[in-house]
Amino acid sequence: MKAYVFPGQGAQFVGMGKDLYENNEEARALFEKANEILGFRITDLMFEGTEDDLKQTKVTQPAIFLHSVLLAKSLGDEFRPDMVAGHSLGEFSALVAAGALSFEEGLKLVSARAHAMQKACEARPSTMAAVLGLPDEKVEEICKEVSTEENVVAPANYNCPGQVVISGTVEGIDAACEKLLAAGAKRALKLKVGGAFHSPLMMPAQEELAEAIAVAEFKTPVCPVYQNVDAKPHTDPEEIKNNLIKQLTAPVRWTQDAEAMIADGADEFIELGPGNVLQGLVKKINRSVATSGKQ
């Protein structure tokens, strides 16, 4: 069974999507529609911008969404997913690819999400760190130990066994990294990100996104969507909406997502979007499944 997976923030690169724009008429028309909807030429930033341009959350998220969704559309009848999933932002790409959201609705929500997250980041200095070489339970335990009302620290991404990303205030992350290294982590490395994604610090963004999601039209997808919040397959539009809202302050359970899809019969994972990060993570979760990608 085929599982199509869609990457999240961090996979962007200058030049992404340019081939699609130049060689696919439908993609070119949708790229131009996106420029209109967003109110700026995101294609210029994607194709010829700088890395710094692309790192802005309000640019990164719609750029990755566009690249991923238009790759799925370019496959035409070849795109026959048995199941889909996306990592964080990639969940929106997965929902559009599976027909739960229209292209326009998906892009508007991604743009609203990106702006809301950018605002939340600017309101409170915060960051994330990748932790390698410790069991999930140990990372959770140390996050709880160092987390206070003032300095929140929480697991943000369960990427694969032995790789968890944590989120929190700068002081909280510094304290957690010290303890994690003392507990035997191979690495506890602060990431170059603008904020504490998938943590309680994203609560203001969650409230803003909830308003945008409430007025968007969701349909039943053509196949189950394995969502980050609970790593379970969903087809009910109301459940999908609620899980999308929760996702902003809850951890991305990617390890559990991949394991659930494999348990339900997925033996081939195809990544659509920039980079090949998810293929690598899936291989670390289960070496026996086939992985490939299109970017």
Image (cartoon, grey):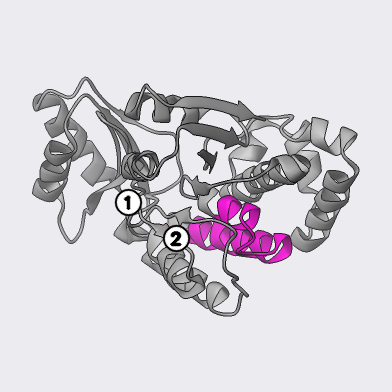
Q: Quadrant of residue 265?
A: top left
Residue at 52% from the left image edge and 77% from the top image edge? 211
* Magenta-tinted stretch: 92-120
Q: How many marks?
A: 2
In what element is the residue under mark 2?
helix
Residue at 44% from the left image edge and 60% from the top image edge? 120
- Relative side of 152 to 67, left or right: left
Q: Is residue 225 magenta?
A: no
Q: Nearer the viewer, mark 2 or mark 1?
A: 1
Residue at label 1?
Answer: 251
Q: Is residue 114 magenta?
A: yes
Q: Label 2: few (<14), some or many (≥20) within 10 Å? A: many
- Relative side of 186 to 13, left or right: left
Q: Position of residue 193 (x, y in %)?
A: 45, 40
Decide which of 23, 121 is in the foreground and name it: 23
Residue at 33% from the left image edge and 29% from the top image edge? 285
Residue 235 is at least partly visible in this image:
yes
Compared with 99, 144 (above or below) is: above
Q: Position of residue 185 (x, y in %)?
A: 18, 24
In what element is the residue under mark 1?
loop
**Three-letter code for the amino acid on which mark 2 is drawn:** Ala
**Three-letter code for the amino acid on which mark 1 is drawn:** Pro
Q: CA distance from mark 2 to mark 1?
A: 17 Å
Decide which of 225, 146 is in the foreground and name it: 225
Residue at label 2?
Answer: 120
Q: Label 1: few (<14), some or many (≥20) within 10 Å? A: many
Decide which of 27, 40 is in the foreground and name it: 27
Q: Quadrant of residue 280?
A: top left
**Quadrant in which the C terminus appears:** top right
